Amino acid sequence: MTDKTVNSDVNQWFAHNQGLVDILPEKVVVEPYRILKGMGMQPADADDYLLDLISNEMEACKKKLMPEAAFNVHFSHQFSPGKYHIKLDEITFKTSKIVYSFLKKSTYLVLFSCTCGPAIENYSRELMKEGNSLEGLIVDLIGSEMAEWITEEVHLFIEKAMEQFGWGVSNRYSPGYCNWPVSEQHKLFALLGENNCGIKLTPTSLMLPIKSVSGMLGIGPGLKRLAYKCNICDDKNCIMRGK
């Protein structure tokens, strides 16, 4: 099979599959240790009361979860290695050395957006206002982990599809991480178009609903997902740290 044939098959796959991805709320899984880690704890530190509380709030959040996920592919791009710029259509992303290094060998680039919907973050705020700070914190952490779980499902969906063509996928990156300016969200959403899952951006590039994730990943022959290079990134609060 020639490269031209493979590219054509990949193009056809995206023509039929890009857009919304079905995410069933009951399938979403969040491991309790991830919540404990967000609280600065180890599993051995948690007593039965806390573990039960996490479990109960997990079930409550699943009932409030309104997941949406979507992606689109960009077949034409231009890399500028000296500046770490990536041009898609007529929009130039000013990324960072870290992001650029993982995407520069991509044949195509995929943009994605994912969200839990607004109900979980509203629930967390209500708990906080009622004085239930611990429960509110747990729910907030659950919402963040659910958003990442949804995003990982989209990533895996694309990765498994590309395997049939002998292609791989890169790590995924979002504006605001790995020194990629968060203000670039506006460029990203301009290209996402209707595949934005109803997410809105504030002037300061905050996504609403807050429990949302957007970003970019690469696909192509020879690409593969690697451990995130947290040792060369100064973002100590990144959710990917330690994965």
Image: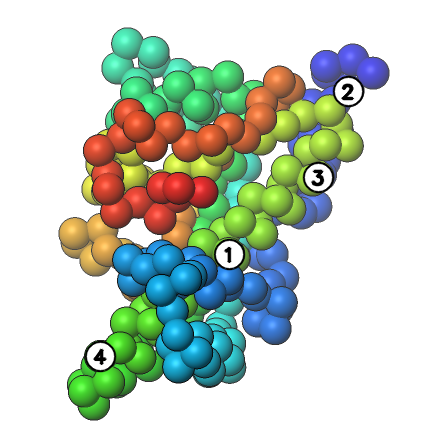
Q: Residue at x 26, y 47 (%)?
A: 237
Which of pointers 2 and 1 lies earlier in the amino acid sequence? Answer: 2
**Residue placed under numbered mark 3 in the picture:** 161
Find numbered disc 3 in the image and state the secondary structure of the residue it sits on. Answer: helix
- Crowding at mark 1 (Cα within 10 Å: few <14, some 14-19, many 20+): some
Q: Residue furthest top?
A: 82
**Front label number (2 vs 3):** 3
Q: In the picture shown, does residue 207 fall above or below 61? A: above
- Crowding at mark 4 (Cα within 10 Å: few <14, some 14-19, many 20+): some
Find numbered disc 4 in the image and state the secondary structure of the residue it sits on. Answer: helix
Q: Residue at x 63, y 28 (%)?
A: 168
- Tag of residue 5: 2
**Scheme of image coloration:** rainbow
Report the Cα–Cα distance between label 4 and label 2.
Answer: 57 Å
Report the Cα–Cα distance between label 3 and label 4.
Answer: 42 Å
Q: Amino acid at mark 3?
A: Ala
Q: Residue 220: image x %, image y %?
A: 61, 23
Q: Residue 136: image x %, image y %?
A: 28, 77
Residue 35 appears anywhere in the view: yes
Out of 165 and 228, give the one closest to the viewer. 228
Q: Quadrant of the N terminus?
A: top right
Report the Cα–Cα distance between label 2 and label 3.
Answer: 16 Å
Q: Is residue 202 left or right of residue 229?
A: left
Q: In the picture shown, does residue 27 fall above or below 114? A: below
Q: Residue at x 45, y 37 (%)?
A: 172
- Crowding at mark 2 (Cα within 10 Å: few <14, some 14-19, many 20+): few
**Residue placed under numbered mark 1 in the picture:** 149
